[in-house]
Amino acid sequence: MNIVPTNTFDQDVRDYIRKKKYRHIEDDLYDDIFKCLINDILIGDEIKGLNLSQSEHVYKARAKNTSVNVGKTNGFRLIYLYSESLSKIYLLTVYSKKDHETISKAEIKKIIKTYL
């Protein structure tokens, strides 16, 4: 499985690191999410209603935030798209649950439209 970080995802991670708010974001994402994705294990809850092709699925996965010592409930949310036909996972965006309660389907569609 090929994992492709989008510019939006990269920017989100850089912003958190630059602000020195969540210095361990990369490790937290790797420990809770990337290890699974690298081994072809799709994790998280599928986000329905995005009107994608049958071979594309968007998921929201949770990761702990060790920088502020909170569990997955108040940790990070990673939104990613799995394209079955391309055998790729696109890392769309990541956000802290403390900063944003949720991300709208419209925002997700906008990110997808930018990269696919």
Image (spheres, rainbow, N blue to C red):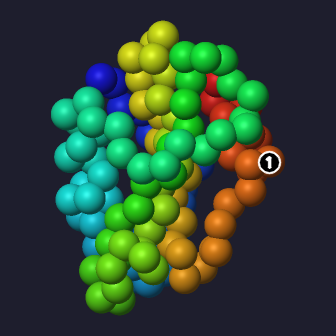
Q: Residue at image x 36%, y 45%?
A: 43
Amino acid at pointer 1: Ala
Q: Does residue 26 appear anywhere in the picture? A: no
Q: How many marks?
A: 1
Decide which of 69, 57 is in the foreground and name it.
57
Looking at the image, residue 97 lies above or below residue 34: below
Looking at the image, residue 75 lies above or below residue 39: below
Q: Does residue 60 appear anywhere in the picture? A: yes
Q: Quadrant of residue 39?
A: top left
**Residue lying furthest top in this view?**
85
Residues packed near mark 1 inside 10 Å, few (<14), some (14 to 19) or many (20 plus)? few
Q: Residue at image x 26%, y 30%?
A: 40
Decide which of 71, 115 is in the foreground and name it.
71
Question: Which residue position is annotated with label 1?
Answer: 106
Q: Residue at image x 28%, y 47%?
A: 34
Coordinates of residue 18 in the picture (x, y in percent)? 45, 74
